[in-house]
Amino acid sequence: MLRHLLLVLTIICFTIHNVDTTVVKEIFEHEEIFKDVIGEATTINLLNISYPSGVKVNLGNILTPTEVKDEPTIEFKGDEGAFYALLMTDPDAPSRMEPTAREFRHWLKVNIPSNDLNNGETIVQFAESGPPMHTGLHRYIFLLFKQIQGKSSFNLPFIPSRTIRGRISTSTKNLKESMNLELVAGNFFLAEYDEYVNNIHEQFSE
């Protein structure tokens, strides 16, 4: 915990657009995100993420489900002519201590042209962060990948925002391999249960 706090203090010395890639890598390693979600550790850029509530995601800061209930704004500077995939995932389902349903896929967009997220193709509609009661803090991870083969047709089923099927027990590692993706940026926050989570769970269906 102390080491994590020191790393966060290091980040404060930079603006959000200029965090050193090695700092992002260190924090991802410390929080076991490479091990649990991505695979081999690599230096990556920081993804700029902000919510309509006014909060921003900043490498493991603690936010509440109420604060992050709406779809966030993602900012990144892509390479001209390239296409990207954006993923939001929770590897701590139902808890970090017992992740028997790892991972829960919250959001997936593909074929995002350059840096225009609004023109991407949604595969998994955005679902709010809903950590169950008494399961502690969950890691909510955003990852941006470059599509190595450019714009592609992916054989993946569409998942509506209130459907659980197709979200539970998913694998970022498998997705990355099957879609030939290269990790370029990421960010994450921590959250645990608050009363708003009840609303989320009531609206989900199989």
Image (spheres, rainbow, N blue to C red):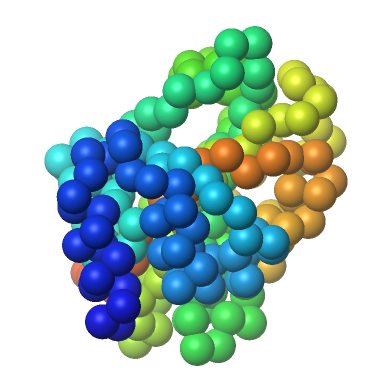
- Is 141 displayed left or right of 20 in the figure? right
160, 9: nearer the viewer: 9
Residue at screen point 58% across, 81% down: 99
Q: Position of residue 40 (x, y in %)?
A: 69, 61
In this rendering, the answer to whether 113 lies above or below 98 is above
Residue furthest to the left = 54
Give the vertical position of 136 relative to 67 (above or below): below
Q: As drawn, is 8 to the left or to the right of 82?
A: left
In the drawing, does residue 111 fall left or right of residue 117? right
Residue 205: horizontal and vertical position, in percent?
55, 58
Indicate the position of residue 185 as horizontal and vertical percent values: 51, 42
Report whether 3 appears left or right of 95. Answer: left
Total labels: the figure holds 0
Q: Quadrant of residue 30?
A: bottom left
136 in relation to 82, above or below: below
Which quarter of the picture shows residue 1? Answer: bottom left
Q: Is residue 128 above or below residue 53?
A: below
Whole-percent x and y of residue 64?
23, 62
87 or 177: which is nearer to us?
177
**Residue at left offset 49%, top offset 81%:** 96
In this view of the protein, can residue 104 be seen by the observer?
A: yes
Can the viewer see residue 199?
no
Quadrant the C terminus occupies: bottom right
Residue sitting at 69 percent across and 63 percent down? 39
